[in-house]
């Protein structure tokens, strides 16, 4: 049963989640990027051996068309290339070009540092609890939404 206290807490949680997402959106706009483009750059930055479009879709819970459009924009700008994956030639790995590395270097490491510094301001117990509780809530939420007919 849903009571008013749970509803208030959920609304506050949603406001906080939206504020967090907005932080990334404002940062992305500084570089004329969408939030999803920022997230794709981030994934590529930390993928030393490249990453497949499917990997990006899975990580961002985004559809194939959205990620393909982003990758195509980045390719047109000369930021990324597609290469056959050594393990499975049917899959293409997305990798930065040298100019893509230089472009992303100005954007992603400062953002990653800000994320890390913000998280580090929590004590270790609180940081672990935040991750644990968010994981629990995410699992429950996924299940509840799957159960909707």
Image: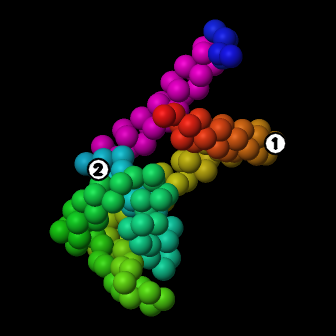
- In this view, the residue in front, 68 or 44, is 68
Helix, strand or loop for disc 2: loop
Q: Quickly name the residue at label 1.
A: 125
Q: Does the magenta stretch mainly form a helix, a strand or a loop?
A: helix
One can see residue 22 in this view: yes
Return the x and y of residue 144 as percentages of the image width and height. 59, 35
Residue furthest toward the front?
Answer: 149
One can see residue 105 in this view: no
- In this view, the residue in front, 30 or 40, is 40
Return the x and y of residue 46 as percentages of the image width and height. 51, 67
Return the x and y of residue 141 as percentages of the image width and height. 60, 37
Q: Is residue 35 above or below residue 98?
A: above
Q: How is the image coloured?
A: rainbow
Magenta segment, which residues? 7-29
- In this view, the residue in front, 63 or 11, is 63
Q: Which mark is residue 144?
A: none
Residue furthest toward the right?
Answer: 125
Task: Identify the residue shown where x is 61% and y is 50%.
Answer: 116
Residue 93: within the magenta? no
Q: Is residue 6 above or below residue 65?
A: above
Pick the quarter of the image with the N terminus. top right
Quadrant position of residue 54: bottom left
User: Which badge, 2 or 1, is on the more N-terminal residue?
Assistant: 2
Quadrant position of residue 8: top right
Q: Quickly name the residue at label 2.
A: 33
Residue at mark 2 to residue at mark 1: CA–CA distance: 35 Å
Q: Is 98 displayed left or right of 59 in the figure?
A: left
Return the x and y of residue 118 as percentages of the image width and height. 61, 42
Quadrant position of residue 130: top right
Q: Are marks 2 and 1 in contact (CB under 8 Å)?
A: no
Task: Identify the residue shown where x is 33% and y is 60%.
Answer: 64
Residue 11: within the magenta? yes
């Amino acid at each position: 049963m849903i009571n008013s206290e749970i509803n208030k807490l959920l609304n506050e949680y949603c406001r906080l989640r939206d504020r967090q997402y907005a932080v990334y959106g404002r940062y992305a706009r500084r570089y004329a990027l969408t939030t999803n483009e920022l997230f794709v750059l981030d994934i590529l930055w930390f993928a030393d051996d490249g990453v497949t479009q499917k990997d990006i879709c899975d990580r961002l819970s985004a559809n194939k068309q959205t990620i393909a459009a982003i990758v195509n924009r980045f390719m047109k700008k000369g930021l990324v290339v597609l290469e056959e994956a050594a393990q499975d030639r049917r899959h293409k790995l997305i990798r930065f070009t040298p100019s893509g590395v230089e472009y992303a270097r100005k954007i992603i490491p400062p953002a990653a540092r800000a994320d890390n510094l913000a998280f580090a301001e929590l004590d270790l117990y609180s940081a672990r609890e935040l991750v644990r509780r968010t994981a629990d809530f995410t699992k429950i939420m996924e299940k509840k939404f799957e159960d909707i007919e």
